[in-house]
Amino acid sequence: MRGKSLMIQGTASSVGKSVLCSALLRILHQDGVRCAPFKAQNMALNSYVTKDGLEMGRAQVTQAQAAGLEPDIRMNPVLLKPTGDRRSQVIVDGRPVGSMTAVEYHQYKPKLRTHIREVYESLERDYDCIILEGAGSPAEINLRDGDIVNMSMAEAADAPVILVGDINLGGVFASLLGTVLLLTEAERARVKGVIINKFRGDVRILEPGLRMLESRIHVPVLGVVPWMDVELEDEDSITERFRQTAGEGDLNVSVVKLRHISNFTDFQALTLQPGVRVSYARQSSDLTGADIIILPGTKNTIEDLIDLRNRGMDVPIIRHARQGGTVIGICGGYQMLGTRLLDPLHVESRVPEIAGLGLLDMEVTFSPEKLTRQSTGQIQCSAGWLSSMNGQMLDGYEIHAGQNRPGDCVPWLTIRGAVDGLCNPEGNVLGTYLHGLFDDGLFFSALRAHLRHEHPDQSPSRIQTMADFREHEFNRIADIVRASLELDQIRQIIRGQP
């Protein structure tokens, strides 16, 4: 081993690889090691736009922040964004290269291998250590020939591997043992240890099983990490957040769970605000009692609008707005608020035209060109409560392929001199393409004060930003993982020492 890297692989998806990578990166960063994350391929609808306008997966963005770095597209060269028709948009080096079926992508992957290796080597030259993350399980032997993200990537990076199992799922010893047994001899040689994750209880109970496992797989158990209620942004839409209510208070925020919901990380910041409860609405009854209804981003606006109507969720949303309730649309959700959505070139859907919810007087036309950029918006509005925030700056990013043609709407947010956000004359229905709208807490603080007829508290000391919260979480999970793992052994593994 070259002593420049460590790869974290798992026995399955959602075993906690991403969080452990973030914790290890923060630990190395605290210890003065110049380290960076890397994942060859992500499949997720949660993405981020770098400073140079390139799109990458959220997991490596979070991990870069844990390492004290600005996100770099080299940390995630390939991103797959499912579109809902058994196809995925394929993004390479932050730019879309096409839409492919699983078979088409399987045939395309060999062309990516050399490129991914070159990108990785470029990143590796700039840092002392790279923490790589795998995807799913390396024991998916039917996918071995086309693998570009697990053991083939470990070989390309000459990286030792630590295997992670989730005890919360049950059967952790069998899954760890079975994974190791299904690897080839060369692959097994790369596995230098295992970690048991998400344990609830007294570690002494596990001791007999740990020793038996070590005797079978011939590598050490490097630690047992307890269950951590981690509040860092999630990578995938399989997250448990959709089934939970977060926060406490009497101001109820309902985020509509769209089929192809994307960038739902926009709403984690709301759970930090005092007096706020955030839940995800799957059916019309879930919207009962909502003070604020949010339509989030989506990878397929038209298909998700059709599904919204099929679930009968359009009626309570429209009724809520007509009765003066607050409705906010972000990106695809913003487009749904319009009168008509046009897709003549079938950019997102086979449906060329559909009526929107009719809550904002605007038409949206989809075009093949996708805008991806970090942006700063400025509130400039003549309607309702928003006028009290005139001049306020909001930082975020944009990812969209639609162009709006407004009618009787009121501009409320401008970006680079152009109108980005529109609202109705009453100011209770508004939309924007700006992701990250809530991250600094100022916008939502003013909205909450308006709904509660209170004076807005804009004191920075009273408003927790997402940036501050992330820092607290990174340090918290680093402390837990430091206390749970054999870090001296892990440092030896990274250095390639026996």
Image: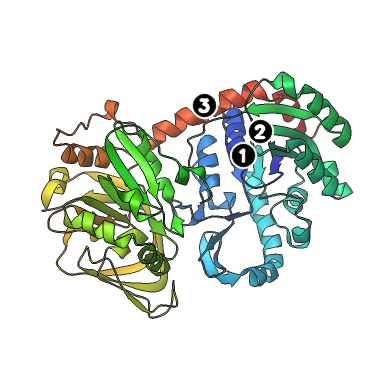
Contact check, label 1 and label 3, Cβ < 8 Å: no
Q: Nearer the viewer, residue 223 or 255?
A: 255
Contact check, label 1 and label 2, Cβ < 8 Å: yes
Please tell me how crowded label 2 is: few (under 14), some (14-19), or many (20+) other residues with Cα within 10 Å: many
Residue position for label 2: 197
Please tell me how crowded label 1 is: few (under 14), some (14-19), or many (20+) other residues with Cα within 10 Å: some
At label 2, which amino acid type do we have? Asn
36 on left or right of 213: left
Query: In the rendered view, would you say 111 is above or below 492?
Result: below
Whole-percent x, y for residue 74 in the image: 58, 52
Residue position for label 3: 475
Please tell me how crowded label 3 is: few (under 14), some (14-19), or many (20+) other residues with Cα within 10 Å: some
Residue at 72 percent of width and 44 percent of height: 11
Decide which of tag 1 and tag 2 comes sooner along the chain: 1
Residue position for label 1: 16
Whole-percent x, y for residue 329 in the image: 30, 56
User: What is the C-alpha distance between the residues marked 1 and 2?
Assistant: 7 Å
Which quarter shows the N terminus?
top right
Quick check: can you spot residue 234?
A: no
User: What is the C-alpha distance between the residues marked 2 and 3?
Assistant: 18 Å
458 on left or right of 336: left
Residue at 46 percent of width and 28 percent of height: 472
At label 3, which amino acid type do we have? Asn
Question: Residue 246's image quarter?
Answer: top left
